[in-house]
Image (tube, helix red, strand yellow):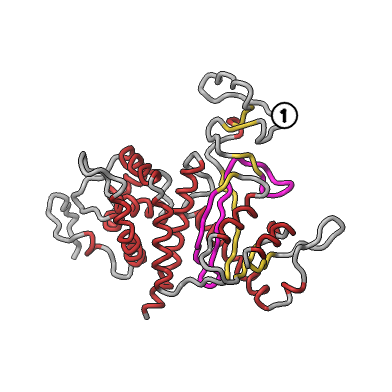
Amino acid sequence: MRGADEQTGSMFSYLSPEARVPQDHPLRAIRRLTDRALERLSPRFGTLYVKFGRLSVPPEKLLRALLLQALYSIRSERQLMEQLDFNILFRWFVGLGLDDAVWSPTTFTKNRDRLLDGDIAAAFFQAVLIHADAHALLSDEHFTVDGTLLEAWASHKSFQRKDSPSDPPDAGGNPTIDFKGERRGNATHQSTTDPDARLYKKARGREAHLGYLGHVVMENRTGLIVDALVTPATGTAERDAALLMISRRPGNHPLTVGADKAYDTRDHVRELRQLRATPHVAQYASGPRRRSAIDRRTTRHAGYAISQQKRKQVEQAFGWMKTIALLRKLRHRGGARVEWIFTFAAAAYNLVRMRPLVDECAV
């Protein structure tokens, strides 16, 4: 018998968002991990707000919404609010009831900036790592470092000389700029759209982009990110950031650090060893102009081959952050804000990677 096409929009529904979400949905495990991390941050949230005035967007709900934006590749806060308005799964994850009003994009963005001032992304990242350590998912011996180019939200047209005023824009606001044959560099030029972005190319013969460099330290056993950092894009930034992040590792015990050929320099290898870190860097092929900074005393050990195999997993983290979390082309300007978003995306990646690992530990 054919069913009737009845419209039930005016009837009441007695099912909560919790009942609508399947028990085996992947977001359930991520929600549990997220709530554990947010419980640790509750005292810190209290220091960001005054005791009187109009109620703001709860920081817990705001961070859950930002997680959804990273997990589901949502391009903007405006589109995120639109999704929250009609998506029951998203409402459940954030903690909104079916009848709760959704915030305006402007209100959401202003409240997010308050968390930027409180450096909440780094605190959330550390809270996720504490939970991972409680499940014995982290070691303190074997790591990988690497960096990637984050293309800034700025065009080559905005990269103009510092000592000369810019020409008035053409009709329509899109100026015609011919910079062919002009020698342009970070010492003499600066982006008017994002002054913190620098002109950089990843390798010789590649095109140059305005951007930043994002750096991570990955734990080799589980592939979790244990440190994240954003720096201006310079030729030595990857090695400088690696030394800084390795020096921040707790303890004074020996450890190994895997890396690609960009880290195979004598100064970098020497400074790593001063930090009691064995440099398992990929070797440059010996030639008349350059030789590798490590030799058989390092490469003959089985651990070197394992580090070289494991270090490739860091590209999975960069790939996820650039394609899923949409960091290939940044949507935020300014070094502090870019580092906030990069660190938060690293925490989101850890949550995704921890979901099956924590389930295994619970079995």
Reply yes or no: does residue 335 show up in magenta.
Answer: no
Report whether 94 appears left or right of 299: left
Task: Please state, as top left, top right, bottom left or bottom right, where the C terminus lies in the image.
Answer: bottom left
Q: Give the structural element (helix, strand or loop) at label 1.
A: loop
Res 162 → quadrant: top right
- For image coordinates 38% across by 42% down, the residue present is 113
Res 357 → quadrant: bottom left
Q: Position of residue 174 (x, y in %)?
A: 54, 25
Task: Please state, as top left, top right, bottom left or bottom right, where the N terminus lies in the image.
Answer: bottom left
- For the record, the magenta segment spans 201-230
Q: Which amino acid type corresponds to the residue marked 1 in the rendered image?
A: Glu
Q: Position of residue 53 (x, y in %)?
A: 21, 39
Q: Which residue is mark 1?
A: 182
Report whether 290 appears left or right of 82: right
Reply yes or no: does residue 214 show up in magenta.
Answer: yes
Q: Residue furthest right?
A: 288
Q: Position of residue 288 (x, y in %)?
A: 87, 58
